[in-house]
Image: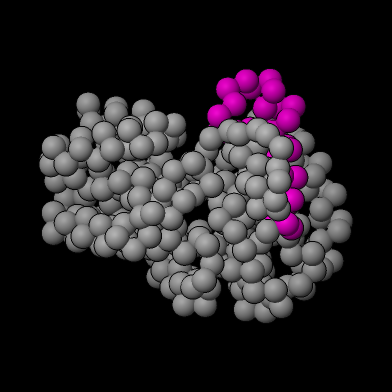
Amino acid sequence: MKNLFLTLLFSIIFNFFIYSVGMCKTNEESVTSVYKKMCWLLKENTDEIFLSEHGIDAFNYSIEILKKSPKSQESYYAMLIINSYGFKSYLYKIEEIFNSLNKKHYQHIDDPNFEENEKLIYLIIYFHGIGAKSLLEQSERKIKAFEVFKNMQLNCTNRDYAALATTMLFLSNNTNDRLNSIDYFIKNFNDHPAIPAVNLYKIMAIYDFKKISSDSTKINECITVTKNLIEKYGNVNLPHGWTFSIDCYCLLINCYKFINDNENAKRYYNIIKKEAPNYWLLNDLKEMLID
């Protein structure tokens, strides 16, 4: 159960979803509405037939979000959601989208300023190897995608898209490269709305539970820095419908569970249950506390 929860926990930065409908009065509300439709489609919808028919719409939603508001929490989360949850049972439809995008973008793949909003989503599909003919081609695509994200990070004229490209470098399997990309984001895009989430991601990258779960000193350090982050950003509202503190409480619960402090783990669980009853990991947290 813990291993399953850790897999979910390391997706925490980009996976909190409540579906909402209604008329939009401002551009910001419009972006949030599109974002929530995308989230509902990939995370809340339980109709597999509906998903097989309409799941592909999530890619169009993400492109729209990146186009309308690249400097937003919605754009940050949308890219990571697509990367983690966009590739499901409708792969043949994704391949159709990829073929269309590939004809348009591959010839400009090394141009960091060519239709950046669409290019970033294209690169995620490219990175996942959709339509690749061999394992070698899949591997080569991943290498190339990281090269292009790096090029966009450094050379995008629009720095909002450079920031989004940087977030994809967080996915590196190399811990040092991942931390360097996170630090680059924090230093160069410190006014970005996703800064709280990026800082939390950094904590989770430093205190990798797969390596420190038996080290109570490291776990306590993680608790301390997470609480400091709550003091700084805890009241920031997220597009998911709750404050940033809720994400941090989830991490604290896991920390306390590892050092067998069930009292504090349950205390933070009850706070989440009260303040964010629709929190997407609530049932997993409950099962972990029972385990």
Side of 132 relative to 87 (left or right): right
Which span is picked out in magenta?
40-68
Q: Residue at x 15, y 37 (%)?
A: 262
Q: Could you say where residue 21 lies in the image, as x and y percent from the top left?
A: 65, 33
Q: Residue at x 19, y 45 (%)?
A: 256
Q: In which quadrant is the N terminus drawn? A: top left
The residue closer to the viewer here, 56 or 98, is 56
Residue 66 among magenta residues: yes
Name the image quarter holding residue 211: bottom left
Residue 112 among magenta residues: no
Q: Could you say where residue 126 lies in the image, as x and y percent from the top left?
A: 70, 54
Q: Could you say where residue 285 lies in the image, as x and y percent from the top left?
A: 31, 33
Q: Residue at x 52, y 77 (%)?
A: 188
Q: Could you say where residue 66 lies in the image, as x and y percent from the top left?
A: 69, 56
In the displayed structure, 130 sits above or below 179; it is above
Side of 284 relative to 72 (left or right): left
